[in-house]
Image (cartoon, coloured by chain):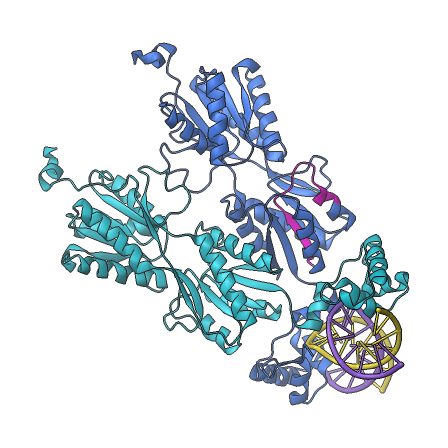
Chain colours: A cyan, B blue, C purple, D yellow
Amino acid sequence: MVGKSEPGVVTLREVAEVAGVHPSTVSRALNPATSHRVSKAVVRRISETAERLGYRANLVAASLRTGRSHLIGILVPDIANTVFSPILSGASERLAAEGYLTVVADVPDGGRQLDLARSLVARQVEGLLLAAVTRDDPLVDYCIAQRLPAVLVNRSEARRRLSSVVSDDALGMQLAVDHLMDLGHRAIAQIGGPESTSTGYNRHRGFLAAIAARGLAPEAAPCESAEAYAREAGQAAAHRLLEAHPEITAFVAANDLLALGCYDALKARGLRCPADVSVVGHNDMPLVDLVAPPLTTVRISHREMGWEAADLLLQGMRDPSASTRTLVLAPQLVVRDSTARPRTAARRRGAG
Amino acid sequence: MVGKSEPGVVTLREVAEVAGVHPSTVSRALNPATSHRVSKAVVRRISETAERLGYRANLVAASLRTGRSHLIGILVPDIANTVFSPILSGASERLAAEGYLTVVADVPDGGRQLDLARSLVARQVEGLLLAAVTRDDPLVDYCIAQRLPAVLVNRSEARRRLSSVVSDDALGMQLAVDHLMDLGHRAIAQIGGPESTSTGYNRHRGFLAAIAARGLAPEAAPCESAEAYAREAGQAAAHRLLEAHPEITAFVAANDLLALGCYDALKARGLRCPADVSVVGHNDMPLVDLVAPPLTTVRISHREMGWEAADLLLQGMRDPSASTRTLVLAPQLVVRDSTARPRTAARRRGAG
DNA sequence: CTGTTAGCGCGTTCAG
DNA sequence: CTGAACGCGCTAACAG
């Protein structure tokens, strides 16, 4: 027989016996929300014996009874990615303040996401934070079908059926493009992220829009999508672009890792940054201020994103009829040393 | 009344009614461990109706009954720190393979750790992974008193009462010191971590031992402890050392962040690395291969540490009588460009 | 192979 | 203000 309380585990009933009251009185006395319905003296006696016996409420039992688990699940594609850990940190801070604990599921961006979500639901999580969705993700359908409160973080969904917190990707790209054009660049390439992610998709469109707004011809702004947000993918994309468009003087990358891959490609080709080619990243992840050269990038506050998403989720849990909202955070351009005025064609050819 | 199943939530009993069998038969049929005790035909019928009704087992109820939550808690001092996220990642991978979910508690290294641990225990976690302990931590006493399976990661405890997975800090320091002395350095300073952490303590002692083993006088190897594993703290410590010992030609830092703070201090003083002063870090965290100059550092596989700690925890849970073990992982020196032969005194004074 | 019975630990009615 | 009784959803003994 399982569950036969080991000697060490004190239950409500035992506290009641020792204190000489009924278990339900102990329950009331120990619950801050109901303790006022019990006489001061009895509350004291119960609290003391509970303390003395080392009583700890069994939240699993309470959950079964109340239907509330005080657990929030969060799905991230890669915990070790420096983009997601601040999100996690901000979210768990906000949630902890309301007494919620965070269950993290690291899902390798494959088909296992739905399984994991189901497993979290089976554990009665009260809501989900989704940091790993694609633009058209079955997970979203699932949450809606299950009427499970959920909020998207960092990425949004094409049909906006769920609340989300994202950065203004179009603005970010505009900031980057404006900065480069102001410096004098007229041949700017983009290294985009995977088009299946909202960030990849929106930053690509944002780049195109920014280019058009400044009256640059599309031919002067070639694009390549990286297969993943990874350094290697960025390197490969940069090589492809440089091969096809040797006239490029600047790169706008859809994230910092891609930008660093770009550095790798430039180095391999004997090109210097920013002397020969300028590079702009996206995210401002830790340490990019220390790489060589310090990376000019579009800063996003991921910690704040996580915090706000958690807040939105809590609101949605309190009021299920609340309308879905999209919170758009403004990014900021951080200029460092990876961007500079382009050299003239003459100097580039070796005269300088 | 709470818990009155909403229309959408299907229970075991409902499946049983529709399938025309007893609830316990459904339980047996749906549990892989017991389904063989039910006739093939009935299993099929039950599985189908369960599927059709969209039945999802309530693991909270199962937990209450079986006393097993399939939840593991992990306490980290800072999720956003790039040292801990790989640990988390490795651990959750190992645990997920055994059907365990990971509950992450981000504890701001204050006194709230015990509270958090209690809250996890109240949720019936079956074991704890501790990545945030100090050398003499009440948390350890707590786990032992509660007979709660627990394993320390990255840091160890002075009395070794709990199993742990750590890197060989003494070896790491020896690798660093040997490398610098082989290059010709004879005035080597250490920027240590907080002495309250095992890593800070052990790396400091390891440094001293390595210096002594090579026959260098203690006066030629001054040390400063940083108050925290942070860039700013490293910078401050480096300034103090440089002020008091201008003859220093190399720094050994207790972690990479400290080493990067050291870069900041050198830059502020107009000293170049490695031309004027060499720097060695510890951890080999992401991107330190890209900073300027690429950091020579002692590599630790945090992901592996997390994985092994989880494995040790699972073993301890299966066999509570198992002896406590300390798994020591060997670090590796990764030589990059932040270390070089020291310049001669003459050249240092400006002749070169 | 299946049904019956009991209860995990708690919170919440309803009485008094 | 306190006690009694019930049940959340599930699983494990015991029968048959």
A197 or B151, nearer to the observer:
A197
Q: Position of residue B245 (x, y in %)?
A: 48, 16
Is B310 above or below relative to B281?
below
A346 or A213, nearer to the observer:
A213
Q: Is residue B76 shown left or right of residue B159? A: left
Residue A28 visible in rendering: yes
Q: Position of residue B203 (x, y in %)?
A: 58, 29
Inspect the magenta stretch and tell me whether residue B137 lies in it.
Answer: yes
Inspect the magenta stretch and tell me whether residue A351 lies in it.
Answer: no
Query: At 65% from the left edge and 48% from the top edge, which residue is drawn?
Result: B112
Q: Is residue B10 shown left or right of residue B184? A: right
Query: At 56% from the left edge and 24% from the top edge, which residue is drawn?
Result: B207
Is B222 above or below relative to B140?
above
Name the quarter where the C terminus of chain B is drawn: top left
Numbered range of the magenta stretch? B125-141
Is A108 above or below relative to D3?
above
A265 or B330, nearer to the observer:
A265
Query: At 69% from the left edge and 40% from the top edge, which residue is drawn?
Result: B137
Q: Position of residue D12 (x, y in %)?
A: 78, 71
Is B22 above or below relative to B123?
below
Q: Position of residue B239 (x, y in %)?
A: 46, 24
Residue A107 visible in rendering: no
